[in-house]
Amino acid sequence: MWQDLILSIIGVAFTIILIPQLLDSIKGKSQINPLTSSITGCGCFLICFVDITLNLYIAAAVSLITGFVWLSFFGLAYKRKNNLQVVE
């Protein structure tokens, strides 16, 4: 299905765009609100579920990866809030 290809390309682009922000968060140069990252990550998982019901398996895999990237921001914020050391 052409929809699977288009949604996958857009999802990959969104994930790649997040990588510099994630690296800056790991280095402590920037921070993302944990509520924002957790809601967005959960939303990506919901999109993954919907994609699976539409048999858009590639787009579902990309949504799953994007959701994990967003939730990694939540994990970084949690570690900083509780003064835990972030390992690079």
Image (cartoon, rainbow, N blue to C red):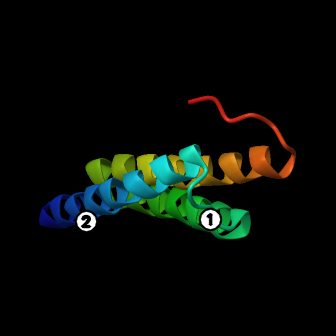
**Residue 3: percent from the left, percent from the top?**
19, 67
Screen quadrant of the N terminus: bottom left
**Residue 83: percent from the left, percent from the top?**
84, 43
Give the residue number, with chain letter if any, for mark 1.
32
Left or right of 69? Residue 39 is right
Of residue 11 and residue 1, the one placed in the foreground of this image is 11
Q: Give yes or no for contact between labels 2 and 1 (Cβ–Cβ under 8 Å).
A: no
Q: Image height check: is 73 above or below 32?
A: above
**Residue 85: percent from the left, percent from the top?**
75, 34
Picture quadrant where residue 15 is located: bottom left
Picture quadrant where residue 40 is located: bottom right
Of residue 11 and residue 55, the one placed in the foreground of this image is 11
Mark 1 belongs to which amino acid?
A: Ile
Task: Choose mark 2 or mark 1, whichever is in front.
Answer: 1
Of residue 63 and residue 38, the one placed in the foreground of this image is 38
Label 2: which secondary element: helix
Mark 2 is surrounded, within 10 Å at the Cα level, by few (under 14), some (14 to 19) or many (20 or more) other residues, namely some
Mark 2–mark 1 Cα distance, whole angstroms, equals 22 Å
Q: Image height check: is 33 above or below 80?
A: below
Specify whether residue 52 is in view: no
Mark 2 belongs to which amino acid?
A: Ile
Mark 1 is surrounded, within 10 Å at the Cα level, by few (under 14), some (14 to 19) or many (20 or more) other residues, namely some
Screen quadrant of the C terminus: top right
Left or right of 35? Residue 82 is right
Q: Image height check: is 32 above or below 62?
A: below
Label 1: which secondary element: loop
Residue drawn at 50 percent across, 52 percent down? 24
Give the residue number, with chain letter if any, for mark 2.
10
- The residue at the far left in this view is 2
Residue drawn at 33 percent across, 61 percent down? 17
Left or right of 76? Residue 82 is right
